[in-house]
Amino acid sequence: MMRIYITLSIVLITTGRAAAQKGVNSLYSAFGIGDLEERDYSRNFGVGSAGIARPSGQFLNELNPASYSAMPMQMFYFEASMAGKSVQYNSSNNTQSAGDIGFKRFAIGFKAHERWGISVGLMPYSRVDYKMLNTTAIEGTTENVRNAVEGSGGLNRFYISNAVRITKNFSAGLSSGVIFGPLTTVDSLANDAVHTAHNQHYRNLNFTAGLQYQGKIGEWQLGAGATYRFATTLSGSGDFSIRSSDETILYQDKSTSAEYRLPSQLGLGLSATSGNITWLADYRLQQWEGLNAGKADFKYVNSERYSGGLEYMFKRMDYYGRETEGIALQAGAAFHKGYIAVKEQPLEDFSISAGVSIPTRTGHLRYYLGLEGGQRGRSAKGLVQENYFNVVLHLSLRDNWFYKRKEL
């Protein structure tokens, strides 16, 4: 067991360092509140991040808070994820590559009662990471000057989720979250003689409700799930400053404030298991149209995501001679129309994914490796095309922390 704790400690140290790195430099994160994190960096990753109808029997499934009622009693869950990304950007006259690695998820979970499951976790909600070079005219002259606009930061989501099994087949859950984080924009001249910095910090509560059904028809174990994330308005406070090259403050306004509205999100999911094979399919919708003020270079559009896949589970004998889950192989795909349209063109993202989950000999710890390749935007439509490849490492520990031995 000591080996398990050492492994998890190394992952936490690595993800803590990796979270500070940046380099993806996505142009599209300059719009709105950045790139929204639509993927699930758990064992759902390899099936297109589908899993709204999936119970949390072997891992923690935050795609539906109602799933936590399926956790076994006397089990404590500890999970951590990190991901690496490599991107190639293609436009009509330029090609560029970038990549980085970072923390994606941390969560714990346990059963407080036979019908009541709890999970607590932290994950990214959005990410801002871009740098754009522009040519700006100097007012009153015929001269132009080069300037750079750089954005960084992003929002995170800390949550506490509760699930209750209402009947034998139905469960309900509620995820209470706090969305928070900084967004920073720095605009500097080419000679870096002076630059402006706009720092904004957003925060507010956000709630997601979920329902889940699990039943059996013949040899098929069927599942259905639905989630609803309530709309919320993020409150922002920050400052605006003008600084010289040596960071001397020439002007500062500490009273800047802003609001940003997040729409509700509807999610629907289905699952079907027969023997060793599980099929999954999800649909998610966010209605962004009419929210917030768009700019000349982009507008808000309704966001939709379709995803699905299959998982094949090999059976094996555990440490005590009982049949249990062995290695799991996955394949999936997803199509996502983002919440931003650039040059009247919606940002469409198509990806295919695969994953493998490998248990240790005792079954307490599972190593998961997920792979994904995809494309966002199309250079043929005048956009910057992103060809990307993601690698995810997810560790899931289950331990009998609440088990008491009986003395004879």
Image: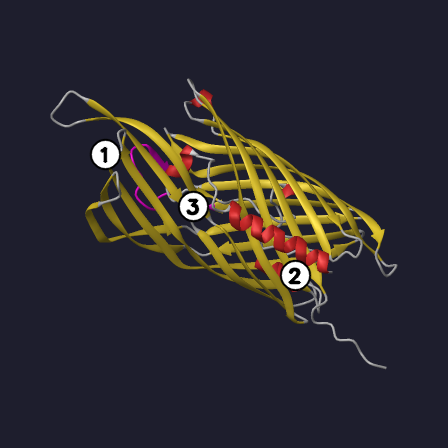
- Image check: 385 left or right of 48? left
Q: From what the image shows, is residue 76 above or below residue 18?
A: below
Tell me where residue 302 sits by quadrant: top left
Q: From what the image shows, is residue 242 above or below residue 297?
A: below
Q: From what the image shows, is residue 77 above or below residue 295?
A: below
User: Which disc is residue 287 wearing?
Assistant: 3
Q: Which residues are magenta?
A: 286-299
Residue, far bottom: 408
Q: Is 295 within the magenta?
A: yes
Secondary structure beneath disc 3? loop
Q: Which residue is mark 2?
A: 77
Q: Residue at x 80, y 79 (%)?
A: 406
Residue, far right: 321
| Magenta stretch secondary structure, dominant | loop
Can residue 55 be seen here? The reply is no
The residue under label 3 is which amino acid type?
Gln
Q: Which residue is mark 1?
A: 193
Where residue 212 sits in the image (x, y, percent)? Answer: 62, 58
User: Which disc is residue 56 wearing?
Assistant: none
- Most foreground residue, 32 or 23: 23
